[in-house]
Amino acid sequence: MILQRSLIAVLVGGLGALAAVPDAHAQALPTPIQLVSGLDLECYRTPGPSMEAHVALTHLNPVMQELNFPAHQVVIKELAQTCVPVRKNNAFIPPEALSVIRHIDFACFRIEAEPLAAPVQIKLTHLNPLLAGLPSHRVWLERPAQLCLPMAKNDKPVPPEVLPLVGFIDLECYETDPDPHPSFTRSLAQLNPQLTGIPQHLMTLDGPRRQLCVPVRKGMQGEWQQIPADTLKLIRWIDLEKFEAQPSVFIAPVPVTLHHLNPFFAGRPSVPVVLQEANSLLVPVAKNDRIPPNGAP
């Protein structure tokens, strides 16, 4: 409860934008392409309790808006996965982006929602430099399947200079009917300061089942959750494709307690999980050739 009160206080004090932080401790913002292209998240199977929460979701990404994806209602059900930031093959990540990415952690919950009236075709292009040689490919979005909510871990609050950014990243993941994609293997190293004890390991990604996770805002028009302008300009470009591990990677069990960051759920109880079976990887993609800006959005 003390941690939750401290998180709420920091959020309330920092909602103007990251630029409101005093100059002596100002957080240098990455560009959208710096943030998104370095954002890879390893997802662990962590079955947990159901939230039984009804929320309305509105799309933030420009492509989803141009495709006229409507606002829609979902029911947040049981916890399915916990996703944590990783570095692939020891690749360089710009410091401005790394200072944010290392604190992006998600709890991904199964959701109940109406399927799309008809599948929607989207072209995806890999953004991470280590996947640049893999082909662009198409997926057909079919139905919402998960909602990934931002989390803090254990008794360590997210640094206040990045909290107004990471606390508003919510991703809705759609089941897709995808084009074939070549398998790939990468070495993964943990970026979150609390998980650096997990040894670096290889993961092979393959299989026909994939999801596309896109940024959303909670609430219908007129009831939208207010997101700071500087934050919105960045998070609206976060699109991640989820590939399944073949096979899952097992590590020594790591107990973690998750605490909600988004103000919408700040009063919800914490959730204990155990990281042991890594079963998928979220990698950054661009949709329909709309590359995130490399300057002011």
Image: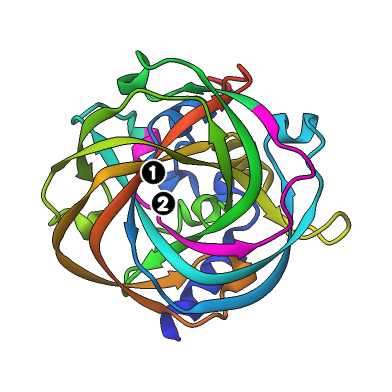
Q: Residue at x 82, y 57 (%)?
A: 220
Q: Nearer the viewer, residue 221 or 193?
A: 221
Q: Which residue is mark 1?
A: 101
Q: Residue 85 bears which disc, if any? A: none
Relative side of 226 to 50, left or right: right
Task: Look at the picture and state if 22 lies above or below 80.
Answer: above
Badge 1: few (under 14), some or many (20 or more) residues near its Cα, within 10 Å? Answer: many
Q: Amino acid type of disc 1? A: Ile
**Discs 2, 1 touching: Cβ within 8 Å:** yes
- Front one among 76 and 84: 76
- Residues drawn in magenta: 96-121
User: Judging from the image, what secondary structure is the residue with disc 2 in?
Assistant: loop
Question: x%, y% of residue 290?
Answer: 62, 20
Residue 39 in magenta stretch:
no
- Using a 10 Å C-alpha cutoff, classify the residue at mark 2 as few (fewer than 14 neighbours), some (14 to 19) or many (20 or more): many
The residue singled out by tag 2 in the image is 104
Name the residue: 47% across, 37% down.
241
Q: Residue at x 72, y 45 (%)?
A: 59
- State the image coordinates of residue 240 (x, y, percent, origin top left): 49, 38
User: Can residue 47 be seen in this snapshot?
Assistant: yes
- Whether residue 227 is visible here, answered yes or no, is no
Task: Look at label 2 and name its amino acid.
Answer: Ile
The residue that appears at 24% across and 59% down in the rendered structure is: 277
Q: What is the number of callouts on the image?
A: 2
Q: Is residue 169 above or below residue 210?
A: below
In the rendered image, residue 100 lying in the magenta stretch gets the answer: yes
| Quarter of the image where one finds residue 215 | top right
Is 262 left or right of 224, judged from the image as shown?
left
Q: Secondary structure at mark 1?
A: helix
Q: CA distance from mark 2 to mark 1?
A: 5 Å
